[in-house]
Image (cartoon, rainbow, N blue to C red):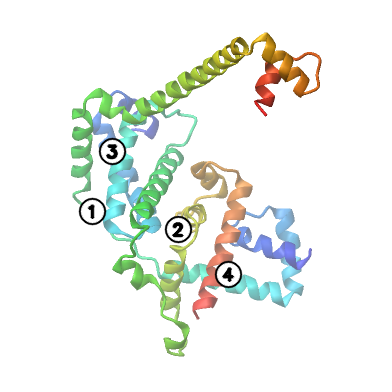
Amino acid sequence: MRCHRARRLLSPYLDGEVDPRRRASLVAHLSGCEACSAELRRLRDQQDALVVGDQVPPLPPDLWGSVLSALDDAERLPWHRRHRARLVQAACVAACVVLGFGAGAALSWRAESVSERVSMGERAMIAEAFDVTAFNDCEVLRCGPR
Amino acid sequence: MASLADSTLMERLAGGDRQALRVLYERHAEFVHRVAYRFLRNEEDARDITQSVFVTIMERAHRWRPEARLTTWIYRIVVNRCIDHRSRASRRRRATVSDGDLEEIPAPEESRPDRVVDRAEQGARLLAAMRELPERQRLALILSRFEEQSYQEVAAALGCSKKSVESLLVRARRSLAKRISRHR
């Protein structure tokens, strides 16, 4: 095992999460590599120091009362406010669907109206300008006026 | 009721039984509060998170499936609450830096007395450095190191793979070492 690979295994090794096969080759590497062994000692010291400095305050004794009050408050809320997040989500989905259909309808209406506005004379002029003998309305839409 | 299994209590909870919630609170509130405090390092915030987690447990009891371990499901709720709280708080604080934050920022190198750092002091610095880690690295470290959860359990709580947990922890430990050596 190379040092690069061994270094990556040091963290899971400290947590007891290295499988027996990899652990055996890591231990073999550590016994012959002073740099990786020093890194392991440093990581272990860091872990121990982290726990030494850690102090958690006790659970506040009145917290259960606050949980009950919060539950009462939640139950007193009208249905639409209790489920506001879900309602907003549903409204967003509905708005996207409506916008999607709206945009599709508007585009198809525009294509039709352009097609109606382009007279036969204009078609001939456009065909001449673009040096084509025939074109359809989609081409007119794609090219636009010069 | 105190002797009932978590799964039975959850069934009762889904039917709106608050007494079942009381028993679950007595069993699990300690770790919920511990994780929230270690993540946020603020008593008031840890209290809010714990309260909100138990309200969520009551409201979503019907969604829990007995195949999943209850503690893993609760860890997942705590993790999501912590991340939500953190992003809301960082949005609020974007424009200002509070006095508490200023205390956290280490003094410039030249003004620091040249002295041997004892273990308790190193621990305090590590914990301060931990607050600067990205959320998921910090949560992985809290659950694995302090709560002694296996990588599999941490992965379930964070909603990622075991391999990702391993990688989060490697990066977290490297970042901590770098931050500490920078401030030495």
Callout 3 amino acid? Val
> Residues at marks 2 and 4, common chain?
no
Label 2–label 4 contact, CB within 8 A: no
Q: Residue at x 38, y 54 (%)?
A: B90
> Residues at marks 4 and 3, common chain?
no
Residues under labels 2 and 4: Cα distance? 15 Å
The residue to which callout 1 is attached is A60
The residue to which callout 2 is attached is B146
Q: Dot 2 lies on which element? A: helix
**Residue B178 higher or lower than A92, as above or below:** below
The residue to which callout 4 is attached is A43
> Residues at marks 3 and 1, common chain?
no
Image coords of residue B67 (percent x, y): 49, 30
> Residues at marks 1 and 4, common chain?
yes
Label 1–label 2 contact, CB within 8 A: no
Image coords of residue B86 (percent x, y): 39, 52
